[in-house]
Image (spheres, rainbow, N blue to C red):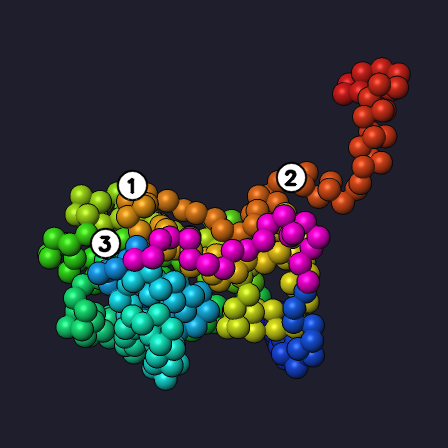
Amino acid sequence: MASLVLRLRRKTFQTFVASSFHSSPAAAQQPPLAQSRFFPPLEAAMLPAGAFRGRVAFITGGGTGLGRAMTATLSQLGAQCVIASRKLEVLQQTADEISAQTGNKVHALQLDVRDPQAVTSCVERMESLTGLPDVVINNAAGNFVCPSENLSSNAWKSICDIVLNGTAFVTLELGKRLICSQKGAAFLAVTTIYAQSGSGFVVPSAAAKAGVEALYKSLAGEWGRYGLRFNIIQPGPIRTKGAFSRLDPTGQFEAGMLSRIPTGRLGRASEMANLASYVCSDYASWMSGAVIRLDGGEYVMMAGEFNELRKVGVVFYFLFFLSLFLWPGPFFA
């Protein structure tokens, strides 16, 4: 009986996902809320030109989404960038486009972060091309939505291998080489706000991202004496093609996201890129072991016990406070 129930649940969820992926793309984007006019995004690079001149930046998952945005900004600021992921064709196209835009060379190296031997080989190729990096951004990730009762061991392992093990393999390989070379560097990990709170339906991702944060905070304490610093950015909802197509293919959850973001809009990849470039720059050389939320206030809105009272309205508050004065006895007996 239990196995039958589990199969029915799995079938229902698969039907839901299938119907979601075949829904109209017109529903995929929600307009920002009215208050967003007070929080306009600034797309231009915030650091001065040349802030990363002479520096080398290594970005995993640099071909698309947030990784591409961070690569473009660092390259614009003068860095020689090396981007790495599994899909070499996508990487090379991104590298060529950013190189043409900024005039700074972007190198594309194929890498499966799940394979420690592949990581070693990739780092050796990078070292021969550019030397060891001054900036390391662990951005490669994997995620999917699934009820936890339907999770297989392979599904769990797949996400943890990419997110946690992949970050560890890259960080430890580069960290050891930097220590031996007596070269300092700034490491940045891209996690998520639910690494702190946990979240149902993305449990492997939540667990793996929390592990990445523990890894980086631990190394910030241990390896600072070698000139290495480690920081973490937890981005909230930022529209990227890969993430939104997998996690919100119909756009039906985006309206709910907007309702719980006090600033009334989603983030922009350029905002993430600006924060990342600052955290990895000499302007933030005293920052290490930090966890920074970039989410328009979403986390604190969801965490606050009484924040939903904003839906009640001004009349309720007036009547409530009036009752405190007119109540014929102690209100809190």
Judge by depth and name the residue closer to the eye, 228 or 212.
228
Q: Residue at x 43, y 47 (%)?
A: 292
Q: Earlier in the sequence, mark 2 or mark 1?
A: 1
What percent of the width, then of the height, locates residue 146? 56, 68
Q: Where does the magenta region start and end?
A: 31-50
Looking at numbered disc 2 in the image, what kind of residue is underneath it? Answer: Glu
User: Which residue in the protein does label 1 denote?
Assistant: 286
Judge by depth and name the residue closer to the eye, 82 or 41.
41
Looking at numbered disc 3 in the image, what kind of residue is underneath it? Answer: Ala
User: Position of 146 compared to 113: left or right?
Assistant: right
Above or below, comparing residue 203 to residue 63 in the picture: above
Q: Residue at x 69, y 72 (%)?
A: 27
The numbered dot on residue 185 is 3
Q: Quadrant of the N terminus?
A: bottom right
Residue 235 in view of the camera: yes
Q: Residue at x 65, y 63 (%)?
A: 254
Which tag is nearer the camera, tag 2 or tag 1? 1
Q: Residue at x 11, y 57 (%)?
A: 181
> Magenta segment: does it hold 35?
yes
User: Mark 2, residues whose alpha carbon is within 10 Å: few (<14), some, or many (≥20)?
Assistant: few
User: Mark 1, residues whose alpha carbon is within 10 Å: few (<14), some, or many (≥20)?
Assistant: few
How far, Cα to Cα, is label 2 from label 1?
Answer: 34 Å
User: Which residue in the protein does label 2 denote?
Assistant: 305
Residue 120 in view of the camera: no
What percent of the width, then of the height, locates residue 204? 46, 63
Q: Quadrant of the C terminus?
A: top right
Looking at numbered disc 1 in the image, what kind of residue is underneath it? Answer: Trp
